[in-house]
Image: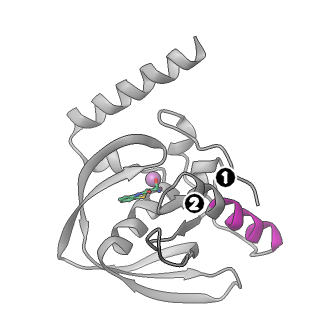
Amino acid sequence: MTIKPLIILPDPVLRVTSEPVERIDDAVRELAADMLETMYDAPGIGLAGIQIGVPRRILVIDLAKDEEPRNPLVVINPTILSVSDERSLYEEGCLSIPEYYAEVERPARLRISFQDLDGKTQERDADGLLATCLQHEIDHLNGTLFIDHISKLKRDMVIRKFTKAAKRVVA
Ligand code: GNR
Ligand code: NI
């Protein structure tokens, strides 16, 4: 298991559409383990493959609190089957946009189908923070970031700030 470097805004890799995981083999299980270790180290509650530069449709989530036992969820090739009309508002952050937070409105509940690490197809209903996190991660698989759901003014501001910061690092 390895902690991988995170891809940070405005890296264009974050805009890539990830491809399906074709075969759930040991390499995919190792990728999932690396993603979980990277997420726990950050620390974060979710991570998509593209955030460590792997353009595959895989995401990991763990919503367990610090004092609770770990509860990792690995989601491969997810499909959103349905979403609720009801919306919910959460203050979101992203490991690829460090220390920036903004409220995002999304469907409050959804039902997804996905493959697990054994290659078995599962269905799952989610609400609350899990629903928000799943949608945030599935967005990453499609090259979408949470700042795409806020006002253009705020989005342009944060992109400009991170673009300037990236230029300072190179200089
Ligand atoms: O760690 C994370 N916290 C978070 C908080 C609210 C809504 C979504 C998230 S996901 C984020 C980790 C991340 O960037 N996943 O892609
Ligand atoms: Ni994110």
Label 1 crowding class (10 Å Cα cut-off): few <14, some 14-19, many 20+?
A: some
Query: Ligand 1 quadrant?
Result: bottom left
Mark 1 = which residue? 54
In this rendering, which labeled residue sits more in front, label 2 or label 1? 2
**Residue at image location 46% in from the left, 74% down from the top:** 64
- Give the amino acid at mark 1: Val
Say the numbered circle drawn on residue 40: 2
Residue at image location 55% in from the left, 89% down from the top = 122
The span shown in magenta is 26-35
What residue is at 76 percent from the left and 61 percent from the top?
A: 1
Q: Assign the C terminus to one quadrant of the image.
A: top right
* Residue at the image position 50 percent from the left and 71 percent from the top: 62
Locate residue 138, reporting x and y percent. 46, 64
Majority secondary structure of magenta residues: helix
Residue 10, percent from left and from top: 48, 33
The magenta stretch spans residue 90:
no
